Amino acid sequence: MKFLDIKLFSARLVLALMLATAILFGWQSFKLQIASTIAEYTSPFSPDAKIKAEYAFWLSPNDPSVRWFFATVNKDIPSKERARLYEDVVRAAPYDFRWWIELARAREQADQISEAEQAIKQTISIAPSYVYPRWQAGNFYLRSGEIQKAIEEFKKALRHNTIYRQQIFSVLWDFFEKDPKMLEEIVSDIPSARVDLALFFAAKNLPEESLKIWRQLDDREKKDRQQTASVIAQGLFDKRFFRTALEFSKEIGFDTNADLEKITNGGFELSVKRESEAYFDWKMIAAAKTEFNPDLTTKKEGNRSLRIQFNGYNGTQFYHFYQTVAVQPSTKYILSFWYRAEKVKTAGPPVIEIINANDDKPIKSSQPLVDTNEWRLMEMNFVTPDNAEGIVIRVGRVVCGEQCPIFGTIWLDDFQLKRS
């Protein structure tokens, strides 16, 4: 007769129970992971979303993300029933503000406005310093017609974070029928938000309002947001609001020597840089068989002039040396400059051209810069068009077709722009 080894049996039983427990927990963990993955990576708008949501719910009915997915895909049920599904989501994770926001939306869609407001308030109570709940609260109150409450929530969102500022400005801009004063009033006591409002106005093609807001900042605030001012200056220049672009560019130190109706470095006393950050200074673009250099010996005024030497440049046009100048529209001006020319040989000699910077149309072209024995003064009378905020003064050439090389040297000095 064999006797049962009690100790051995007990040990095997314990091992079997441990293995069964591990398998059970592993299966449960696997189910939770599968359900969570389905809820996270399946779009609620995919054709099989509803089937996947039901399967995920069967696997893990207490997972809040799964419950949210299940509630979201059930769009064809009555809105009040759908709101109750979102209430189940909140019960599964009562301290996650995201689910309270979803519940507020569902209740609002079910015309349960007071209940929706309670959910919004709970969202803010859970995450009072987060900007997203404030952003959602502001939109909720705006839709509900409670304008003052909406403004207060938006102001708190503006104060706490920069992420939603442009979106808040855009919503209020449309709601208040594009009234700049309303936005200015809202940010009046939030200096950091005023900078972003200046950026918003610039994007909306309101350069004067943008500059007005910027000038309300103190020196420290301006210094802290130089990068934003740089973006505004670039944007205004690209949109051809040259007068306000000039003011912003001066503020950030790019065009400290520039001014309205003034040619910067007209006597070439300062170096002309190929990679200058300035918008309203001489720009020099490398050209084949052409040299640009300061000349310390041949000059009309000051210590130097600009020498341009053509060594067979063969382009039909020449746009490689120019400056943008901010001006007033419909205004009479005189552009004057001094030049010398030596051994210029071509059927298309160099000229000085004035272009409307707002539409790239020519305004005036000088007489050809032909050989001279000494410095010669050139004056150009012109009137800026009605749409001109800026002009481009550039070295060009008379069009002479293809295979029309140019040789020789010209010197330029003492450019000046005056009203006539």
Image (cartoon, rainbow, N blue to C red):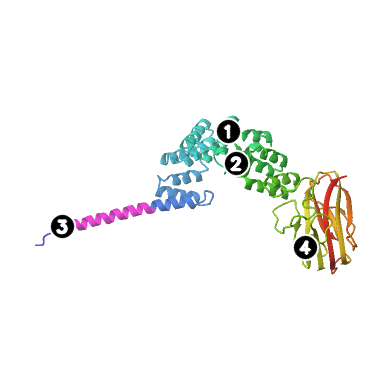
The furthest residue to the left: 1
**Mark 3 Cα within 10 Å, few/some/many (few <14, many 20+)?**
few
Q: What amino acid does circle 4 point to? A: Phe
**Residue 196 versus residue 326: which sits nearer the camera?**
326
Residue that badge 4 annotates: 292
- Frontmost of labels 4 and 3 is 4
Of callouts 1 and 2, the N-terminal one: 1
As drawn, is 42 to the left or to the right of 366? Answer: left
Question: Which span of residues is magenta-colored?
Answer: 9-30
- Frontmost of labels 4 and 2 is 4
Residue 15 painted magenta: yes
Residue that badge 2 annotates: 165
Q: CA distance from mark 1 to mark 2?
A: 14 Å
As drawn, is 273 to the left or to the right of 84? Answer: right
Residue that badge 1 annotates: 150
Of callouts 4 and 1, the N-terminal one: 1
Q: CA distance from mark 4 to mark 2?
A: 47 Å
Kindly indicate whether the residue at mark 2 contacts the one at mark 4 (C-beta within 8 angstroms).
no
Of callouts 3 and 1, the N-terminal one: 3
Residue that badge 3 annotates: 7
Q: Is residue 275 visible?
A: yes
Q: What amino acid does circle 1 point to? A: Ala
Where in the figure is residue 155, as x and y percent of width and height?
58, 35
Where in the figure is residue 8, as x and y percent of width and height?
17, 59
